[in-house]
Amino acid sequence: MASMGYRSSMNTLKALALAALLAVCLIPAQAEEPPAPPEDAPALPGNAPAPPSGAVAHGGHHYLLFDEVEDLSWNRGKAHCARLGGHLAVVTSAAEAEFIAELVDGRYAFLGASDDAEEGVWTWVDGTPWEFTWWMDGQPNNYGGVEDYLATYKKGRWVDVEASGEDFWMPTGYVCEWDR
Ligand SMILES: [Ca+2]
Ligand SMILES: [Ca+2]
């Protein structure tokens, strides 16, 4: 009977260890989603939604890099930023481009422009006129005829890339921006 009790408590210990292991495995998945803006965040009529905590202020706007994103695509990044009340980053000056370069710090991240509607005609997700550019030399090149999405590359310079993919030059995340 004593051995039965011992086995029973060993089974309990195994169950506890398994539960702890599962909890550890689940935590990183949850940590990828930043906390939603607080319910009581100021939402005056006409005001843009408040950025989530952790967003970095620059020039009266806020920015947040999401990196090492599972099942990353430009469209999923765009949708996620929108759910958070922002948009994929819209970069309209050298100062903003340099700030983004610092924020991504060598990582490759999608930004909020594409030429998927008409090849060579770039548009920002928020309708801002396409004027300022920060292309890396030789870009955009629409390589393979399939590169329609804006991303940072080395030193934060812009490249056109596919909407998703695992190649070494492909983004691993995206930058959201809030207009406040
Ligand atoms: Ca293109
Ligand atoms: Ca390219």
Image: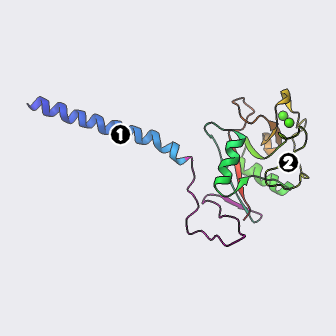
Give the image location of residue 57, x and y in percent.
70, 62
Label of residue 156 in the image: none
Q: Secondary structure at mark 2?
A: strand
Q: Is residue 50 above or below residue 152?
A: below
Residue at the image point whose x is 59% and y is 68% from the top: 41
Chain part drawn in magenta: 32-59
Where does label 2 land, which residue? Answer: 123
Please tell me whether mark 1 or mark 2 is closer to you in this view.
2
Label pair 1/2, CB-CB below 8 angstroms: no
Residue at the image point whose x is 26% and y is 37% from the top: 13
Q: Is residue 109 above or below residue 99?
A: above
Mark earlier in primary sequence (1, 2): 1
Disc 1 marks a residue whose amino acid type is Ala
On the question of residue 107 being in view, the answer is: no
Quadrant of image for the C terminus: bottom right
Give the image location of residue 163, x and y in percent.
74, 36
Q: Using the rendered view, name the quadrant where residue 7 is placed.
A: top left
Residue at the image point whose x is 55% and y is 56% from the top: 35
Give the residue at the far left of this rendering. 1
Give the image location of residue 88, x and y in percent.
73, 50
Q: Secondary structure at mark 1?
A: helix
- Position of residue 129 in the picture relative to residue 72 (left or right): right
Disc 2 marks a residue whose amino acid type is Thr
Q: Say whether residue 13 is magenta.
A: no
Q: Would the CB of label 1 be found within 8 Å of ligand 2?
A: no
Where does label 1 land, which residue? Answer: 19
- Cα separation, mark 1 vs mark 2, equals 48 Å
Q: Quadrant of ligand 2?
A: top right
Q: Is residue 79 above or below residue 61?
A: above
Give the residue at the far bottom of this rendering. 44
Q: Residues within 10 Å of mark 2 (few under 14, many from 20)?
A: many
